[in-house]
Image (cartoon, helix red, strand yellow):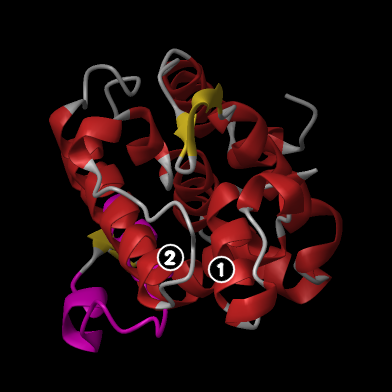
Amino acid sequence: MNTKTAKLGSKLETDLAAIRLAVGKLTGARLPWDAQSPVNLVDQGDRLVRCYEDWLLDDEQKQMLRVQPWDMFILYASSYLCDIGLADGDGLPPLAKNFKDDTAPTFFNRSLSKRSCQLMHDRLQDLGDPDGTLIGIIARVCEQAGAADGGNLSWAESEADVLDGTTVNVPLLAAYLQLCRALDLKSPVTALQIISHMPVDNRISPDRLEA
């Protein structure tokens, strides 16, 4: 992984590497519009982490994250875990093949977010055995980032997340993740979002957009 995760510290860097390795073993991830085409979730996570490090976050924002290493770890871990629901097609709703329904991509994305979060809780051992409380916070970051309006979680719920006596700013981390995913043009979730904004008569299939 060609990233600067060493700034997390040795323990958190090891935990992140374990999550990345576990995600890499989820070989069943497929494109939502083509069950025969695989999705490399590790590569997607790597792209998001590089995005944070190389240009999305300015020096002040990076420094804020480094003051509390948990925040940086949660953001990076969320980047690898946010779409693991793609590895479980049976738990996701069918997606209309003609992509003419404006509500279909949003409905699918929200369902994907919820399914990904459920898999995090169900597969703690497979995901490098991270702490149960920690994986709960990561799931909430992913769920809020997956909401079209960022409003899946109430502010009171977000404020309740505390690690080592420090409050985790779930809305801020979710905003970083949501923005970074939106800028990742290789992401299938982003492809669906782009298509949903196209005029219905000129709407193309996601595989053409990906190409």
Count the marks: how many? 2
Q: Mark 2–mark 1 contact, CB under 8 Å? A: yes
Q: Which residue is mark 1?
A: 193
Q: What residue lies at 67% left-to-right and 61% top-to-bottom?
A: 204
Q: What residue lies at 20% left-to-right and 25% top-to-bottom?
A: 123
Start and end of the magenta stretch? 139-160
Mark 2 residue element:
helix
- As measured in the structure, the alpha-carbon distance from the residue carrying label 2 to the one carrying label 1 is 6 Å
* Crowdedness near tag 1: few (<14), some (14–19) or many (≥20) residues, C-alpha within 10 Å: some
Mark 1 residue element:
helix
* Crowdedness near tag 2: few (<14), some (14–19) or many (≥20) residues, C-alpha within 10 Å: many
- Name the foreground residue: 1 vs 97: 97
> Percent position (x, y) of residue 140?
28, 61
In the rendering, which numbered label is found on residue 1? none
Q: What residue lies at 17% left-to-right and 85% top-to-bottom?
A: 156
- Name the foreground residue: 102 vs 4: 102
**Among numbered discs 2 and 1, the one appearing first in the sequence:** 2
Would you say residue 43 sits in the magenta stretch?
no
The answer to whether residue 179 shows anywhere in this view is: no
Identified by mark 1, the residue type is: Gln
In which quadrant of the rendered image does the N terminus lie? top right
Identified by mark 2, the residue type is: Pro
> Percent position (x, y) of residue 108?
34, 59
> Percent position (x, y) of residue 60?
75, 75
Would you say residue 158 sits in the magenta stretch?
yes
Q: For this view, does 105 lie left or right of residue 204?
A: left
In the rendering, which numbered label is found on residue 105? 2
> Percent position (x, y) of residue 97?
44, 51
Q: For this view, does 112 lie left or right of residue 157?
A: right
